[in-house]
Amino acid sequence: MLRWFRLVAVAEACSWAGLLIGMFFKYVTESGELGVKIFGPIHGALFVLYCAGVVLSAREGGWSRGAVVLGLVCAVPPFTSLWFERRMAKRTTLTQPA
């Protein structure tokens, strides 16, 4: 589950990048909204998967409620899903017996 969570967190961050680039072209250069039409639904689906991944990984990894709340909050600002995933991967590695 934690491996799947890592994949979803990275994909969610990449979809943020695509959506931000699409928004730049839509609102700043006003050259069209194709990027937003493509990356909007992709990012939405990955956002939902990321949130589900936080909850499921928390069950498997024994995360605290505070960690779950932090993980869900990290779904909102761009690219913080990567920071949270790395933080929890490090904690999980440190707490697992060798």
Image (cartoon, rainbow, N blue to C red):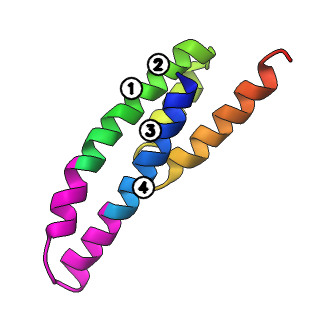
**4 or 1: tag closer to the N-terminus:** 4
Q: Which mark is residue 52?
A: 1
Which residue is under mark 3?
8
> Residue 31's x, y, as percent?
16, 83
Q: Is residue 38 magenta?
A: yes
Structural distance between the alpha carbons of marks 2 and 4: 21 Å
> Disc 3 residue type?
Val
**3 or 2: tag closer to the N-terminus:** 3
**Is 82 left or right of 93, judged from the image as shown?**
left
Q: Residue 55 occupies which quadrant of the picture?
A: top left
> Residue 82's x, y, as percent?
55, 47
Task: Classify mark 4: helix, strand or loop.
Answer: helix
> Residue 4's x, y, as percent?
49, 29
**3 or 1: tag closer to the N-terminus:** 3
Q: Is residue 31 magenta?
A: yes
Structural distance between the alpha carbons of marks 1 and 2: 6 Å
Residue nearest the observer in this picture, 9 or 69: 9
* Span colored in magenta: 19-41
**2 or 4: tag closer to the N-terminus:** 4
Give the mark toward the camera: 4 or 1. 4
